Amino acid sequence: MSKKKIRNANKVFNFSENYADILDLFSQDDITDEDIAQYVNADLDTVRSIKHTWINEESFNTLKNPGS
């Protein structure tokens, strides 16, 4: 099975609203990746990949624009 690159989390999560709810779930320590996967009806590897990507982008943007 080949891996497809995820370009749009909305398509993966069938989520037509903004990302605020999902990002909020990622930021909560008491919610596991497994819980998020079940909530958004996605597989665990997809959730972890998106979470990892968003964390890296957030860290990069913070370094790029300090104080924002």
Image (cartoon, grey):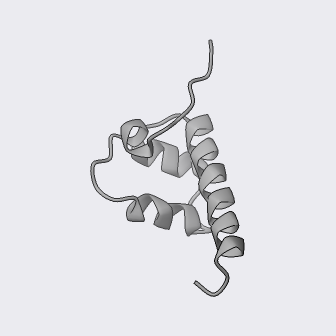
15 relative position to 3: left or right? left
* Residue at screen point 32% across, 47% down: 15
Location of residue 52 with respect to 68 vertically, above or below: above
Location of residue 13 with respect to 36 vertically, above or below: above
Q: Which quarter shows the N terminus? A: top right
- Give the residue furthest to the left: 16
Location of residue 68 with respect to 15 vertically, above or below: below
Q: Which quarter shows the C terminus? A: bottom right
Q: Where does the image place residue 57, in percent across and percent down from the top left?
A: 63, 59
- Quarter where residue 8 is shown: top left
- Give the residue furthest to the front: 64
Query: What is the count of numbered marks?
Result: 0
* Residue at screen point 67% across, 82% down: 66
Q: Where does the image place residue 18, in percent across and percent down from the top left?
A: 33, 59
- Give the residue furthest to the bottom: 67
13 relative position to 24: left or right? left
Q: Where does the image place residue 32, in percent across and percent down from the top left?
A: 60, 55
Q: Where does the image place residue 65, in percent across and percent down from the top left?
A: 64, 77
* Residue at screen point 57% across, 30% down: 5
Viewer-proximal residue among 43 and 59 = 59
